[in-house]
Amino acid sequence: MTTRSISTVWMGVVLFTVLLGFTGFAQETRGFKFNNLTVSPYVNVEYNYDSNVDLDRREYDDSYLTVNPGVDLTYTGNDWGLKGNVWYGYDKYIDYDELDEPRYGQSLSVYKESAKGWRLVLGESYMKSRVDDSILDGGRGIWRERDIFELTGALSYQMGERTGITLSGLYSDLNYSNDNNMYGRLYGWQEWSAGLELARKLTEKSNLLISGSYQEYESDGAKGLSSDSTGYTLMAGFGSRATERISYRALTGVGWFDYADDDQLTGWTYSLDANWLINKKWAASVAGSSYFQPSEREANQAMQVYTLSGGLTYRPMRKLTTRMDLAYRREENEYARAGVGDVTDDVFSVRFRADYQLMQYVSVYGGLTYEDWKSDDRSQEFDRFLGTVGLRFRY
């Protein structure tokens, strides 16, 4: 499975953060303080049960233990700041020890702003993992070993009281480790993208948004076929201005995708992000998008993806937080398989999670997740249950 285009994801998140801000439950201040620098180390220790470790119709199950240390960094200056994270994880399976693998990653983002209306955000991240990339968290649903490196940037300028503009860009390199003796091959890619968005004030609480983007892809495809693809989108919609409890972005439009330097696809695209702090105990969020991207299962082919997810958080008391998430993902592939034609895949997922603060630096958490894969290709149909119980130590 695949996720919404990396450029689309990043542009939505960054533009949403830069222009609108984020509303959520207040968090307690943690970490070691060194003037304006905060360092917050943590360790997660988990027991997990997976009913389908291979994401396969045969459904082999197993339990595994996870250790996941990391550290968060934040620094706030007069007109600039940074946020960073470094983490490591190791999973120890009870039966299938060939799945034991370390994983690790890091991220860093820096912002700079001026009284004249400029704001610059730069980001960098790297991850190496084989853990499920859950669609509940905006992922692709892929669990195969992979590494991904990203560079991001956004420059926004408030041109006047009513008009703002943001220029964004991204470079991404996605690679899969393929073992042809165990699994079918997956194809990663390199991506270069740029976007431009114009925000025009309509009322004290709303903006008219117009955005366009351009993407170039170079896939890790088969020899003898073109690995180059290009994409374009043009969308318009509405977004909130500064509000205390509600923030949203909703855009829709059209996208074009020229893949393998040969065929062109045209389709409906949309982007949705909304957050609502209902009261001190309840909060809700909705997100969704549609876009084209290269196929990861068929060399130099393409697909259109549709996603929609929602979450509801309930905090009945200061020490207890619960959350329920729902997600749906649809992939319309442009290639045909023998006996099934053009394949369409649908993925559904639901998750329940609870976190309880045992003491100042220790919390316990647990969660249940169900995932269901439906496809025109029966070999791609299966389901999965995941259960997690863990302790988090954070200072």
Image (tube, helix red, strand yellow):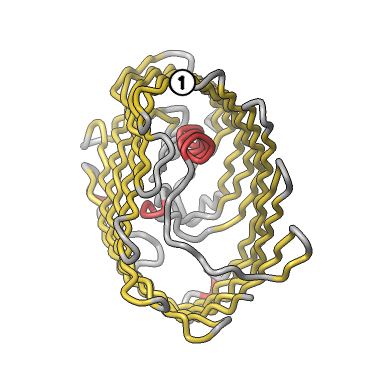
Where does the image place residue 279, in percent across and percent down from the top left?
31, 60
Please give the count of numbered marks on the rendered protein.
1
Question: In terms of depth relative to the viewer, which is nearer, 354 or 182?
Answer: 354
Question: In terms of depth relative to the viewer, which is nearer, 151 or 19?
Answer: 19
Where does the image place residue 115, in percent across and percent down from the top left?
67, 31
What residue sits 31% from the left and 25% below the top?
252
Where does the image place residue 162, in percent across and percent down from the top left?
46, 20
Question: Could you tell me which secondary element the residue under label 1 belongs to?
Answer: loop
Amino acid identity at mark 1? Arg
* Relative horizontal placement of residue 258, taking residue 236 as reference (left or right): right
* Relative horizontal placement of residue 321, taking residue 90 as reference (left or right): left
What residue sits 41% from the left and 34% below the top?
241
> Which quarter of the image is occupied by the C terminus?
bottom right
Where does the image place residue 174, in percent across and percent down from the top left?
57, 41
Instruction: Name the outermost residue toward the right.
Output: 34
Number of residues whose C-alpha sits closer than 10 Å to that of mark 1, classed few (under 14), some (14–19) or many (20 or more): few
Q: Is residue 362 visible?
A: yes
Q: Please tell me whether residue 253 is drawn above or below residue 79 in the rendered image.
A: above
Residue under circle 1? 162
* Relative horizontal placement of residue 153, taking residue 225 as reference (left or right): right
What residue sits 62% from the left and 35% below the top?
152
Question: In terms of depth relative to the viewer, which is nearer, 168 or 175?
Answer: 168
Instruction: Name the outermost residue toward the bottom.
Output: 359
